[in-house]
Image (cartoon, rainbow, N blue to C red):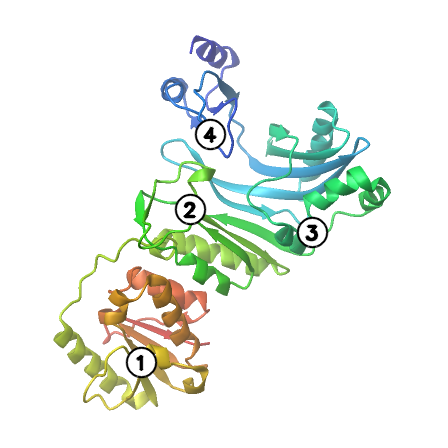
Amino acid sequence: MDEAIEFYDAEGLKEVVLKPTSSAGSVGVHICSNKQEMISALEDSFSKTNLYGEALSEMLVQECIVGDEYIVNTVSCEGMHRVTLVWKYNKIKTAEGAIIYDTCETVNELNIAEAEMIEYAYDVADAMGIQYGPVHGEYMIDENGPVLIEVNCRPCGGGMTAEFLDKIAGHHETDCILDAYLKPDHFKEKLKQKYQLYAYGAVKFFIVPDEIAAIASPMSNISVKLRSHVKTKMVDVNETDMKVFPKTKDLFGSCGTVFLAHKDYDVIQNNIDYLRNVEKHAFPLVLSEKNPINKGDLQNDLDNLKELIKSNSKYGTGLLVSDKFVDGCGILQLHPDEISPVVSGFDYIILNLNDIMFEYKIDDIVKILLNCFENVKTGGVIIIPKSSYQLFNGGRRGVEALIKLLDLKIELPPYHIKDTIVASKR
């Protein structure tokens, strides 16, 4: 502690970064805004273990660099360094001072100051005496230029598969490493080529906002509908093997990741925005707890449903998708399991799902809802009353998130219709 305080005062520091000398994935990393925060964080850290379960006997105190954070991955052959891929981080600082991952996105074209960072990364590899193999470096660019944060002689982590990397760059680190050792002539030819990616890539790490006891991870069935989806890796949970997830404090506190790649940058950004919105407003679609909602007043709900059907009958041919037959409503009725593309030519579809919301697993409910939404005709309208959406694990926002997933338009609520989701197919 005395050494840390002496260093802090001698350097005239304000914000500092604390990290274990041996760890990974931002476990144990803190950003401290002043000396007292540093002292408190050190006292707390020395009572804990690192990622590998070892007691923390040493902590590194660093000046906090404020700027953009990057990954520069290189592979070397005979001391010549080739950049395989450049990534840019988006991280979030929590109220407790922890640093957590949000996204990591490819740098397809260099922006101002980034070429200088690449030269700096070459210098780092030279300074370490690297002749062969991979180097994974993390850097920041502040007002004074590039700064080394950390570096190691290994491929990039994050669970990135060869399939994912090939889709983006036409190569992955393992094949580049093998070339460096086994086919140096081929490596040198590749070294002459321009840095050019075939697609934009991104990884979205899900942030758990508070401790949750999860029985399902519906995101596995949701993310596959995204245009840029490559792979989803969620922690496996089910109703018989409930898992408690703590609030995210570091990379290993993420409950899952989605890997995205697409030639159109806007598609990637739209998909990232969608996942962030689900994470923020409809987290039960990422991880679901046991549904705490009880069935409401069924007779009152049926009366409201019949009134809704009557008021919409003038707008054309309708379909009621219901898990129980409703007497005296004068509309074609189908059970959700009977829906198929053959019956998609309706001007409006009304959903009446009650028992299903309790008897089916949330993954199956998600599939049913998406199937209903996909089968409305272009220009058609989907109507979901509160009696149905309030029973869904994600509530109204969860249903709206599924509507947005399929690029349906959530309509402005009509003045005379309350507590009802109205959406249309473009």
Mark 1 crowd level (few <14, some 14–19, many ≥20, 10 Å Cα): some
Q: Secondary structure at mark 3?
A: helix
According to the picture, the residue beneath numbered tag 4 turns out to be 51
Residue at image location 21% in from the left, 84% down from the top: 326
Instruction: Spot the residue most to the right.
Output: 185
The amino acid type found where label 3 is placed reads: Ala
Disc 1 is placed on an element classified as loop
Instruction: Residue under label 2, please give it.
Output: 255
Residue 44 spot, x, y in % from top left: 36, 21
The amino acid at mark 1 is His
Vertical position of residue 206 compared to residue 415: above or below:
above
The correct choice, above or below, for 138 with respect to 107 in the image is above
Q: Going from the N terminus, do you reach mark 2 or mark 4 first?
A: 4
Which class describes the residues within 10 Å of circle 3: few (<14), some (14-19), or many (20+)?
some
Residue on which the image places disc 3: 169
Along the polypeptide, which appears first: circle 2 or circle 1? 2
In this rendering, does residue 113 appear at all? no
Is 335 rendered above or below residue 204?
below
